[in-house]
Image: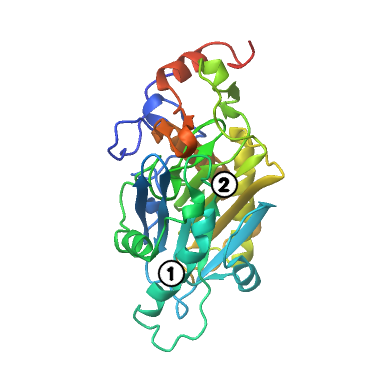
Amino acid sequence: MEPVSRPSSPPGGRPRARDLGIVVGGVPPGPFGAITDVPGVRVGHTTVRNPPDVHSGVTAVVPDGVGPGAPLPAGVFTGNGYGKLIGTTQLAELGTLETPVLLTSTLSAFRVADALVGWMLEQPGCAEVRSLNPVVGECNDGHLSDIRSRPVREEHVRAALAGASAGPVAEGCVGAGTGTVALGFKAGIGTSSRTPELAGRRVTVGALVQANFGGTLRVHGRTVSPRSLGLQDTGPSAETGSCMIVVATDAPLDARQLTRVARRAVFALARTGAAYSHGSGDYAIAFATRPGAAPPVADDGLSPLFEAVLDAVEEAVLNSLLAATTTTGHGGRTVPAVPVDRLLTALAGAPDADAH
């Protein structure tokens, strides 16, 4: 693999996909290769750890100025509905997002939603608000974390919201990805972006994933499993798991078109080897940050954006795996990180790294 130009990598010691020459598609990324490349989008994490039993947290995707008096056009798509995506029915019905999007652990989702409501009611312009639709997604981190303890609390939510920033985004075992597992390996939060040309002008689309789904990893079409890399497969059953995807764009899209974007985000998981099993909750939320800036793009002009979303989500999943570190958690279970050197050796070898 040849060296490639790449966006700035957040500190952390683990490489991102582009650092390794693993490039998905031909559309260039934004400067940080993150959802925060979309103007007006910030991300914050609170990581909640009490080893060995608790590996959890909360991640906040915060569009500037969003609120019930200034909602953003949004769409949602459910690939498999085994999950607790709070706020989805109103979002689908009205096509608007009126709060930040928060991600967390399954049994902590309800506390997180309550904390988000409390935080929103304190924001400017919300003094008279009597109805609010908090949007909170979740993945089950119970394989590595004591999920029944419901460790994520109001102070953690407020810290993630207060600390949300633009620029590089921490990935891997942080925030809502602290205890998640995907495709047999330790996973977590991952993000990526693309800058396609749409209707004659350059736009930005970014994706952030909370990866926790089953299946067998595929990188550039090649199958890679823990076994093929000389590791013991200690992850949960492929029949369990979920993936939450958040997509942001500054392209002028309406809610119906953003629902089409959200569909492509879920479709992209198939490229990475997702099993889409009975027990998986696979959801995507897509929102636009510049409502009213220009008329919506014609539907027959959306294909470059769809392609960019597919590529960004695929790369975000790879980043979630590559940034994660081997974790020993609840019950003494250990899930290994992807060993980068062995992965590169496998990718340079036979077309199918698991075919032996």
- Which residue lies most toward the left here? 11
Residue type (three-letter) at the residue carrying disc 2: Cys
User: Which image quadrant for residue 170?
Assistant: top left
Furthest toward the right, the residue is 278
**Near-viewer residue (15 or 257):** 15
Image position, residue 169 (x, y; %) = 35, 47
Query: From where the camera sits, is residue 344 visible?
Result: yes
Q: Name which residue lies at 42% across and 69% down.
A: 115
Residue assigned mark 2? 243
The residue under label 1 is: 116
Asked whether the viewer can see residue 194, the reply is no
Look at the picture and state if 173 lies above or below 157. above
Q: Which colour scheme is used?
A: rainbow
**For the point 39% across and 39% down, which residue is it?**
52
Of residues 287 and 117, the one drawn nearer to the viewer in this rendering: 117
Quarter-wise, where is residue 255 in the image? Answer: bottom right
Relative to 316, say whether 281 is above or below. below
The CA distance from mark 1 to mark 2 is 21 Å
Camera-side residue: 348 or 341? Answer: 341
| SS assignment at label 1 | helix
Mark closest to the chain's N terminus, 1 or 2:
1
Badge 2 marks a residue whose secondary structure is strand
Task: Tell me the tag on residue 323.
Answer: none
In the rendering, at what x and y percent does residue 286 appear?
54, 58
Q: Residue at x 47, y 62 (%)?
A: 101
Query: Split into 4 quadrants, where in the image is the N terminus?
Result: top left
